[in-house]
Amino acid sequence: MPTMKTAQKSVAVLALALTAALPALAQQPQPGDPGYVRVQGTDPTLGAPPPILAPSRDLIDYREEMRTFIQRISTYARAQNRDFQIVVRDAEELIIKRNLQDDAIISPARTFTRSIDGVLYDGVFMGHMAVDQPPPPEVQQAELASIDRAKNAGLPVFIIDYATKPADIDRIYRSANHQDLIAAVVPRPTSNLSEIPRYPRRPNNENPNNVLTISDVKNFIYISDPAAFGRQDQFALKLHDNNFDLVIVDPFSGREPLNKQAVETLKYKKLGARRLVFARMDIASAASYRFYWQPGWAEGYPGFIGAPFPRDPDRYFVEYWQPGWQDVIFGNPNSFLYGLIAQGYDGVILEGMRNFLAFEGNVEIEQEFAPLSLTPIN
């Protein structure tokens, strides 16, 4: 990992934006400070933990705060690059607003939908809680209804389904084509996608044309672990050797950010036509292995760091409406988004959209944030 001194030498590249220290956020905890540390337990010397996820603590509309956060991200991104594009993942509850007295009464969240360029859904036809598992009819019906609302708002709709059997994969692509959805079918959860799907051998709806905007996209590939391909140049050349219209990548290869040369190589299909490259960016959880994590950070310190995820103790919920966390994500030359734009990405996939459920006291939070299983659930 580059040192702070090295990272401060340049503000024009992603290595700075993604590895520079955030001094305003990195104050070290001192004895007597509020907060506590959880490392296989708690530190009793720092007192009781603050009520990080207590939904009754403040009168906060967590859904509206998430919409506002994304709208601010969008405004900032387009001020840097007017062609930068933003897709949100798992935003079913954000593209609508529910009546406070009767949550069955809904209306479109038009200000929000006009601030984004597309939406991404998971497990629409296959991959509900487990790879190769179809969703229950009522779950699929609700998902398709949300997709229709997104389409009515003029948003392109992407889906990622999880299947391994060729017959199921073919059926998913047929259904997606019939409903004008841009689909990718993958054999495992996106958290560890480290290879190009083996079936089909060519992209669904393979397209020889240049792809300059999201409305031109007919297929895509998602890679969350570039380091599995070897060096950055090996990864870029391997991904270059296909004709997907959109490449979605984690912007880090191991501990190092993908360099500008790798990003530029990814922008061209095998046949030479231009395509889009998006970075994935989780805006509602903090991971202790990410570039922004500072020595001394822990659950409750800084104040925007919440409890760890169920079954994933290296990731933490964040109070995403707090200015300190938003400064990590966007708005300044040390921010995550600034670095991605400077590095040449065409857009981002914003993830973590369902994290507001933790602050609302969702009773099914353990299931909601459990990792997708590789084994079908009977």
Image (spheres, rainbow, N blue to C red):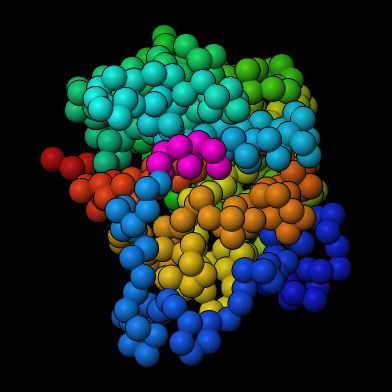
Region in magenta? 61-69
Residue 183 is at least partly visible in this image: no
Q: Is residue 373 left or right of residue 60?
A: left
Measuring from the top left, give residue 221's x and y in whole percent: 55, 35
Quadrant position of the C terminus in the picture? top left
Residue at image position (48%, 42%) is: 65
Against 42, residue 311 (above or below) is above
Residue, far top: 178
The prevailing secondary structure element of the residues shown in magenta is helix
Quadrant position of the N terminus in the picture? bottom right
Name the image quarter holding residue 313: bottom left
In this view, the residue in front, 375 or 85, is 85
In this view, the residue in front, 28 or 281, is 28
Name the image quarter holding residue 202: top right
Is residue 301 inside the magenta stretch? no
In this view, the residue in front, 192 or 231, is 192
